[in-house]
Image (cartoon, rainbow, N blue to C red):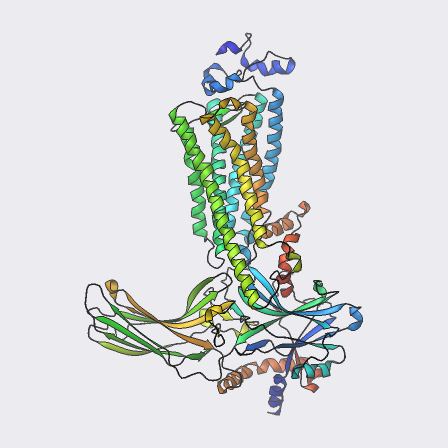
C-alpha cells in the first residue's frame, strides 16, 4: 500500500511539496493514510492522481453553485414561509423541495474544504456525513418532485374540491422524508451498502463498485427507489394532468360553440398559444430537469455495478454530482418564479432584484378579468 | 303621501350609469337584471354618451362578455387559468354603424334626454347562454368567487382588435336570470319507494309528495310523507332535507349541498305493522347557509339581494343535459333510518325554486315588499340627483364592485 510514497516525508507534507515543485506522478488515493486506505476502492487506484487544478476548479464551481443555491432556495424558504398569501397546502411542497435543495447545499462547503486538502477530511465519518446529506436531499428532492406533480394533477383536474388540505399535505411531506430515509441511513450505519469516496476521492456516495451480490442488489434497489419510481410518478401525473386540461378546454370550446362565440381565447394576444402548450412546456421542463439531474448518476451507478467500469474515470464520475447540484439550484426558479403571487411578494420585498410581476404571459390572460373589476375609483 | 307616490313613480324609470376613469365616456343601462323567459330573453339595451372631441377619430366599442370561473384563483399553477372569458356580443357604438336600429323605450327616452352625443347599443343573449350564478366562497378563499357572470364592457379604440386603455374603458356588471313561468302547473311531484330486507320478510314503503312543483324563493316547501311499515324492522327516525344539485358543465363535475334539513323522531319508532303520515316544512334560504362553501346563489351584485340560485330551466324540446354553465336543480330528499342492520331508505323528489314571473300577482307582492324596503334608500338617492328629477329619470351609479380588488 505504501508503495506510492517515494520518499520518507509524511503524507501531510505532500500538498506543500506539490505547490512548490512538480512531483512524481501519483496514483489516486496516494495521500490517504494507511489506516484509512480501505476506504478507497481498487478501481480508483488505476487512475493517476487528479491534478490540483482540477480540485481547485471543482471547488470554484461548487462555490458558485453554493451561492446560487443559497440565494435561490433561501429566498424561497424565506418568502414562502413568512408571507400569508403564500401559505397554501400546495406551497408547502415547494418549501419542502427548497429545504431538500438547501440541504444539498451544505455538501458544498465540505467539498470545497476537501478539494483544498485534495483528500477527504474526517475519513469515514466525513464521508458518511457528506453522503447522507447528498442522499437524503437527492432522494427527498426527487420524490418531492413527484408529490408536486400529484398535487398539481389533483388541483387542476378537479378545481372544485381536488385541492389537498393541510393535513394531507403535511402527511405527504412526512412521506417524502420517510421515503428518503432508508437509502440514506442504511449505508451510513453499514446495515446495507456503504458510503465510499468516489471520483476525485473528495466526494462520497454509496458504493457501486464492490463486486458482490449485496452491492449489486443495493444499487438495483436504489436505482428503482430513487430514480425509476419518482420518474414514473412525474410522467404519470403530468400526462394525466395534461389530458384533464385538454378535456376542460374541449368542453369549454363546445359550450362556446353553442353560444356562437368564435374564439374562446377572448383576449386576442392570448390566441397564439393554447393552455395545452403552456402546460406541456412547464411539465416538460420539470421532467427534463429531473432527467438532467439524476440520469448521469443513475448511469454511473449502473455502469459501476453491471457494466464496463473502465469508462468511469474520476472526471467522468464527478459530472453527475455537479449535474445534481446544478439542478438543485435551478429548482427554486422553476417552481417559484412561475408563481405569480411569489413574484409579487418578491417584488414587494426585494425591489432591487427587478422582478417584474407583470410578465406578458400573465397579463395577457388576466387582462380581461382584471378590466372587469377595475373601478373608476379615482375618476 | 304625495311625496311617497312620486317616489314610487321615479323608481320605475331608474337608470344605471357608469363613467370611465378619465370621465370621457359614460354608459347608461335601463336595468341590471335581464330575464331569460326561456323562449326569449330581454335584450341588453343601453346608451353611450361620449365627448366626440375627445375621440379624435377613434371609435367606441361595446362588448357583452360572460366570464366562467371554475376554480380558485390562488390554485392556478403552471399557467392554467381557472377562468374563461367569452365575448358573446361585440358592436361598434360610435360612430353608429346601423342608424336604423330599433330602439327600446328606455333608449328612446335616454337619447332624448342626453342629446346628440348619446349613441344606443343593443345586445341579445345567445340562445344557450347560461344564467348568472355565484358559488358561495368560504371565508379563507381569496379572489373572485366561482361562477358565471356577465358584464357590458365599453372601450375606446382605433379598431376592433385593439384592446383599449384602462382609463377609457368601463365595465358594468349585469345579471341574466330566469323567472318562473306565469302558471305554476298543477302537477304535484311525488315519489314512492319501498325497501325489503335480506333476512326478514316484508317491506317498508315511503311515499313523499310535495304541495307544488315550483316554489318561489322564500316560500315554505311542504313535503307530505307517508310511511307504511309491513316489515319486522322499525323506523327509528326520519330526515328530510332540501338538496341543491350543482353541475359545473365546463369541468364536467357536480356536487350537492343540503340547503335546509330537518330530523324528526316524532311518531317514531314506526313499529312493524304501523304507519305514519306527516308533513315536513322546510324553507331553503341563502341566509341560513352563509357558512357553507359552494352553495350556488343567483348572481348578485350587491350584498342585499342574495338568494339561492334559481333552478335552471330549459326550453321545451331541449334536454336539461344540454344546458351549459352552472346548472342548478333542487330536490327534497327523505331518509328513513331503519336501524343499524336495516340501513336507510332514501328517496328524492325534484322541484323547482325560482322567482315569480314578471307581471304575476306574486311578483307584484314580491316587488312591493322590496320597494318598501328600499324607500329610504331612494329618498337619499333622490336628494343626490335632484336636478335630474324633472324628466323622471333617476341615475344610479353602478355599484363599485369589489373595491378591495388590487388595481
In the image, residue A231 lies at what x, y percent?
48, 41
Tell me what residue is drawn at x 23 percent, y 66 percent.
B197
Q: Residue at the far top: name it.
A: A7
Q: Quadrant of the N terminus of chain B?
A: bottom right
Question: Seen in the image, is B158 located left or right of residue A129?
Answer: right
Question: Seen in the image, is A24 located left or right of residue B259?
Answer: right
Note whether A38 is above or below B98 in the view shown: above
Q: Which of B193 and A335 is in front in this view?
A: B193
Q: Residue at the far front: name it.
A: B317
Q: Nearer the viewer, residue B255 or A173?
A: B255
Q: Quadrant of the C terminus of chain B?
A: bottom right
Q: How many marks?
A: 0
Note whether A42 is above or below B166 in the view shown: above
Q: Residue at the far bottom: name it.
A: B2
Note whether B299 is above or below B12 in the view shown: above
Tell me what residue is drawn at x 58 percent, y 27 percent.
A112
Q: Which of B393 and A262 is in front in this view?
A: A262
Q: Which of the 4 image quadrants contains residue A286?
A: top right
In the image, residue B376 lies at what x, y percent?
58, 82
Note whether B389 is above or below A200 in the view shown: below
Tell me what residue is drawn at x 68 percent, y 46 percent.
A352
In the image, residue B183 lies at what x, y percent?
46, 84
In the image, residue B287 lies at what x, y percent?
47, 72
Whether residue A209 is visible here, answered yes or no, is yes
Q: Which of A95 and A368 is in front in this view?
A: A368
Whether residue B69 is visible here, answered yes or no, is no
Question: Seen in the image, is B4 located left or right of residue B232?
Answer: right
Amino acid at each position: 500500500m505504501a508503495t506510492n510514497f517515494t520518499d520518507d516525508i509524511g503524507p501531510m507534507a505532500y500538498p506543500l511539496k506539490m505547490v512548490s515543485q512538480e512531483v512524481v506522478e501519483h496514483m489516486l488515493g496516494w495521500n490517504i493514510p494507511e489506516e484509512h486506505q480501505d476506504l478507497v476502492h481498487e478501481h480508483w487506484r488505476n487512475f493517476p492522481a487528479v491534478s490540483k487544478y482540477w480540485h481547485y476548479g471543482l471547488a470554484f464551481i461548487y462555490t458558485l453553485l453554493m451561492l446560487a443555491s443559497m440565494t435561490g432556495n433561501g429566498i424561497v424558504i424565506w418568502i414562502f414561509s413568512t408571507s400569508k398569501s403564500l401559505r397554501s397546502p400546495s406551497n408547502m411542497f415547494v418549501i419542502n423541495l427548497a429545504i431538500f435543495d438547501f440541504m444539498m447545499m451544505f455538501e458544498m462547503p465540505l467539498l470545497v474544504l476537501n478539494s483544498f486538502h485534495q483528500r477527504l477530511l474526517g475519513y469515514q465519518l466525513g464521508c458518511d456525513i457528506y453522503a447522507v446529506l447528498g442522499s437524503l436531499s437527492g432522494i427527498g428532492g426527487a420524490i418531492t418532485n413527484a408529490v408536486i406533480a400529484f398535487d398539481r394533477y389533483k388541483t387542476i383536474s378537479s378545481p372544485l374540491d381536488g385541492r389537498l388540505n393541510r393535513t394531507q399535505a403535511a402527511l405527504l411531506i412526512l412521506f417524502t422524508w420517510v421515503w428518503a430515509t432508508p437509502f440514506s441511513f442504511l449505508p451510513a450505519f453499514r446495515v446495507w451498502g456503504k458510503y465510499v469516496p468516489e471520483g476525485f476521492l473528495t466526494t462520497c456516495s454509496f458504493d457501486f463498485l464492490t463486486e458482490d451480490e449485496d452491492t449489486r442488489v443495493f444499487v438495483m434497489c436504489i436505482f428503482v427507489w430513487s430514480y425509476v419510481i419518482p420518474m414514473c410518478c412525474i410522467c404519470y401525473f403530468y400526462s394525466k394532468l395534461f389530458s384533464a386540461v385538454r378535456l376542460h378546454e374541449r368542453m369549454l370550446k363546445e359550450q362556446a360553440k353553442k353560444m356562437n362565440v368564435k374564439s374562446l381565447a377572448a383576449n386576442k394576444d392570448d390566441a397564439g398559444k393554447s393552455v395545452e402548450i403552456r402546460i406541456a412546456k412547464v411539465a416538460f421542463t420539470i421532467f427534463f430537469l429531473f432527467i438532467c439531474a439524476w440520469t448521469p448518476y443513475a448511469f454511473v451507478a449502473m455502469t459501476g455495478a453491471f457494466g464496463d467500469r473502465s469508462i468511469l474515470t474520476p472526471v467522468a464520475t464527478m459530472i453527475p454530482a455537479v449535474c445534481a447540484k446544478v439542478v438543485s439550484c435551478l429548482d427554486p426558479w422553476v417552481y417559484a418564479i412561475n408563481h405569480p403571487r411569489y413574484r409579487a411578494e418578491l417584488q414587494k420585498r426585494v425591489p432591487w432584484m427587478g422582478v417584474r410581476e407583470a410578465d406578458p404571459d400573465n397579463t395577457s390572460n388576466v387582462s380581461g378579468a382584471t378590466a372587469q373589476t377595475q373601478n373608476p375609483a379615482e375618476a | 303621501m304625495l311625496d311617497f307616490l312620486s317616489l314610487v313613480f321615479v323608481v320605475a324609470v331608474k337608470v344605471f350609469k357608469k363613467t370611465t376613469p378619465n370621465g370621457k365616456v359614460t354608459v347608461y343601462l335601463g336595468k341590471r337584471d335581464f330575464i331569460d323567459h326561456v323562449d326569449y330573453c330581454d335584450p341588453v339595451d343601453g346608451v353611450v354618451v361620449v365627448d366626440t372631441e375627445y375621440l379624435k377619430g377613434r371609435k367606441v366599442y361595446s362588448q357583452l362578455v360572460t366570464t366562467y370561473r371554475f376554480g380558485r384563483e390562488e390554485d392556478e399553477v403552471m399557467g392554467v387559468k381557472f377562468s374563461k372569458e367569452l365575448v358573446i356580443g361585440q358592436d361598434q357604438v360610435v360612430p353608429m354603424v346601423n342608424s336604423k336600429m330599433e330602439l327600446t323605450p328606455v333608449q328612446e327616452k335616454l337619447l332624448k334626454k342626453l342629446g346628440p352625443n348619446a349613441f344606443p347599443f343593443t345586445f341579445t343573449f345567445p340562445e344557450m347562454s347560461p344564467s348568472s350564478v355565484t358559488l358561495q366562497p368560504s371565508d379563507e378563499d381569496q379572489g373572485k368567487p366561482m361562477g358565471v357572470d356577465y358584464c357590458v364592457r365599453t372601450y375606446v379604440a382605433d379598431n376592433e382588435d385593439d384592446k383599449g386603455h384602462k382609463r377609457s374603458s368601463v365595465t358594468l356588471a349585469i345579471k341574466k336570470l330566469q323567472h318562473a313561468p306565469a302558471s305554476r302547473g298543477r302537477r304535484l311531484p311525488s315519489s314512492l319507494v319501498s325497501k325489503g330486507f335480506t333476512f326478514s320478510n316484508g317491506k317498508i314503503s315511503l311515499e313523499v309528495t310535495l304541495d307544488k312543483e315550483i316554489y318561489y324563493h322564500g316560500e315554505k316547501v311542504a313535503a307530505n310523507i307517508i310511511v307504511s311499515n309491513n316489515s319486522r324492522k322499525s323506523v327509528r327516525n326520519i330526515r328530510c332535507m332540501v338538496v341543491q344539485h350543482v353541475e359545473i358543465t365546463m369541468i364536467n363535475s357536480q356536487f350537492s349541498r343540503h340547503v335546509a334539513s330537518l330530523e324528526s323522531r316524532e311518531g317514531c319508532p314506526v313499529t312493524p305493522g304501523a304507519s305514519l303520515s306527516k308533513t315536513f316544512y322546510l324553507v331553503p334560504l341563502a341566509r341560513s347557509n352563509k357558512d357553507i362553501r359552494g352553495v350556488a346563489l343567483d348572481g348578485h351584485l350587491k350584498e342585499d339581494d342574495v338568494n339561492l340560485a334559481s333552478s335552471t330551466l330549459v326550453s321545451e324540446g331541449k334536454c336539461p343535459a344540454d344546458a351549459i354553465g352552472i346548472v342548478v336543480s333542487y330536490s327534497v330528499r327523505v331518509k328513513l333510518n331503519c336501524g343499524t342492520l336495516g340501513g336507510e331508505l332514501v328517496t328524492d323528489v325534484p322541484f323547482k325554486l325560482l322567482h315569480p314571473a314578471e307581471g304575476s300577482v306574486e311578483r307584484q307582492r314580491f316587488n312591493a315588499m322590496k320597494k318598501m324596503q328600499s324607500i329610504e334608500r331612494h329618498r337619499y338617492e333622490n336628494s343626490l340627483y335632484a336636478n335630474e328629477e324633472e324628466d323622471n329619470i333617476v341615475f344610479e351609479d353602478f355599484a363599485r364592485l369589489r373595491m378591495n380588488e388590487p388595481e
